[in-house]
Image (cartoon, coloured by chain):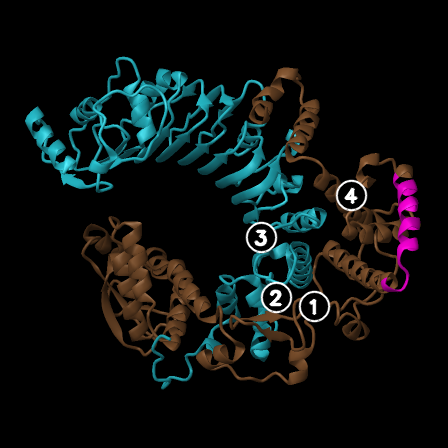
Chain colours: A brown, B cyan
Amino acid sequence: MSEIDMAVIKPEMMKSYIWLQTSDGSIQQVEQEIAMFCPLICQEIITKGMGSSKNSAISLPQQVTPSTLSLILDYCRFHQVPGRSNKERKSHDEKFVRMGTNRLCELVSAADSLQLRPLVDLISRALARKIEGRTPEEIREIFHLPDDLTEEEKLEPLKNITDDPRIRLLNRLYAKKRKELKERERLKNVEIEEERVDERSVDDLLTFINGNDGDSKAVKTPKNKKKNRKKKDQQKNPSLKEDSGPEKKELNGHDTCDQSSDGNIIGETSNLTYEEDGTFSPKIDFDDGDMDDGIDPAIREKIDREVEDFARRINSDWAERMQDFLTSGRERTSTLSATNGNGYLRRHA
Amino acid sequence: MEPEDDNSEASTTISTLPDSILCHILSFLPTRTSMATSILSRRWRHLWKDLHVLNLDGYSVSTHELSRDQVEERFVDFVNEVLHRVQVRRIQKFRLDGEVRNYSHTLSFWIDSVTSGPHLQELYLSLWNSSGSFYTLPHSVFSCTSLVSLILKGDIIVSFDNLQSVQLPSLKNLELEVIYVELDKLLSHCPALEMLKVFIFFNNGGMDPNEIHLPSSLKRLNLESEACDSTVDHLEIHTPSLEYLDLSLVACYSQISVMTYPNLVEACLNICFDDMHTDWMPKLLNAICGAKLLALQASTTACLVCVPSLEFPQFGCLVKLQIGFEFFNSGVLIDLLHCCCKLEVLVIHACESVSYGCLYGEPVEPSSWTQPGYSVSWGSLSFGILAMKSIKWTEYR
């Protein structure tokens, strides 16, 4: 039976009509080439041979009501014409999504069930625009969302465990680093000059031991001083472990909640602060538990090395740096000639 | 606000949509906003964590009372938090715009994590550091076999120590606007590349000879180079599927290899004057003679004027021609128009000074070009000089 149907369809490809049945049971006829724009309908016609007659009407998913179907077909009718320019299509799309939120939701659901990706994207973007830049209250109103979280829940920091052990380690490292920074701040306020002088010489020793270039310690900004002090501390326990491994301790949110509340830089008192421009931003807390020394020192070193690099860069000219980089790059490649640098150097001559 | 319809059908609200669609909606938002939707309602609490798309904007965390370093720290905190909570290995699109100077190792850490996931399709990094420091892209990006689109902008260095491990078999879209890239090395490992957009600030990886070979799968090419002092020895465009070509060559290109492009639809040429360029200009014109749309910037026209005994090929398919002049040269224009039998739209631009080289032709005072351009409907084939003159006079007015 389906073979006969297919034979009937082929010669009349351009003008033939397809029968579609919507969620309410009603059946309508639609130009085939327009309906074929929807992947689901296309599939039904080609693989199952449905839709050629009223009896074998393609029954569409239940999300497709008659009104949404007609909108979808309007969209398809416009876009299936090949000759349109990008500007035309964009302008049509902009007008197309000007409708109420509920209709948009209905439409996106229907388009999704028909696997009409471009329309799903278009409507999703439109709905995203309705969320962006609005306060939570406004959003709840627009989308009729129940305000069913308790105040407590709203303030509670977000918890979840990521699937990447590296990220977990990194997070703990940063939490620890920040904690130590805070301690330094407090100490700094108590003891002043003498401590810094001491630290500097110790730092020098350490960098020498570690075989770094001496120049990075030549000039220090106050900020780097802070970080170098911390570095000295950590390097008291040099050891190289492997850069992997699952977490050793469970994440424990409770005690660090209060502790890191002053480390909470983005949010303020409530979980979402209402900022001047009317948007809201998430509260970020570190719900990592104990800061033990199980954190990989190799990573710590890496991250502290950044500080040295940064200090070094501050002090050298950009051009010099590029030259450094280029020369070291050329050492790696096989061809080597002094004149290679000319192309670049000429620029700065 | 847009008109809200009468909520008679209370059932069809956003809450009836499945999680997958809600997540899809969130993927168009900056991640910070998505994260914040977790307080909207119980349903939305954990929705954002299933995001496969991250849009991390470092500029959005800044406020005027914070210093740059503080902003960066805040941003780093934020990204760490995000990556801590989403399924990093499921990320399909990762976009980061920001300024990262003190935390470049952390950034590499993030990138390594994201690229190790088997689903990563799009990576977008835009790092504009005001201090002049630059960021070396970690190698993990170049062995990300699932990557389809890679866009890098800013103070990023793209260089290769070990070419063997570079594999980008799925890469179709590459956009580079970075301070330093070993372009040829990179392109040689992108066998499936279809769209390429490069802005070369600088000499091309310091290689000797300095060459650029484009992958043969290329369909769209946008090449802009502004390396005034450097020379590219050889630019090879052997791309039979090429549909769109945009060349903006300010640097000197000693040699270009082209071929006829049977699928070419549109070509834009902005080629500055240089003795070497006049050598291969005719070859290039021949190569693009199948185009339907052609745009020649003023610098190109100036260059054309200086080509000794220039003969235009027949532009048999050309429908729309845009041509710019600094100094109007009717000779060139007429010669060109003689070769365009199907031309329908002609747009002539007057340009600001494009100063170089020898230009001859009637110089026209800029003030007479009051309009930037205009379109004429061009009838058919043969036209006499008379018709041309009348058009010319109209322009002057």
The kind of residue tagged 2 is Lys
Callouts 2 and 1 in the same chain = no
Among the 4 quarters of the image, the one containing residue A44: bottom left
Magenta-colored stretch includes residue A22:
no
Confirm or deny contact between disc 2 and disc 3 (CB under 8 A): no
Report, in whole angstroms, how far the alpha carbon at label 3 lies from the one at label 1.
Answer: 22 Å
Q: Which quarter of the figure is the C terminus of chain A placed in?
A: top right
Residue B280: percent from the left, percent from the top?
Answer: 36, 18
| Front disc: 4 or 3 | 4
Q: Which residue is mark 4?
A: A308
Residue B96: which numbered mark, if any? 3
| Front disc: 2 or 3 | 3
Confirm or deny contact between disc 2 and disc 4 (CB under 8 A): no
Residue B237: which numbered mark, if any? none
A292 versus B2 height, above or below = above
Q: Which residue is mark 2?
A: B49
The kind of residue tagged 1 is Asn
Q: Which residue is mark 1?
A: A160
> Which numbered disc flags the more N-terminal residue, 4 or 1?
1
Report, in whole angstroms, how far the alpha carbon at label 2 lies from the one at label 1.
Answer: 9 Å
Residue A90 seen in the figure: yes
| Front disc: 2 or 4 | 4
| Front disc: 3 or 1 | 3
Label 1: how many Cα within 10 Å (few below 14, some 14–19, many 20+): some
In terms of secondary structure, where does tag 1 sit?
Answer: loop
Q: Magenta segment range?
A: A189-207
Specify the farthest residue to the top. B309
In terms of secondary structure, where does tag 3 sit?
Answer: strand
B146 versus B157 height, above or below = below
Label 2: how many Cα within 10 Å (few below 14, some 14–19, many 20+): many
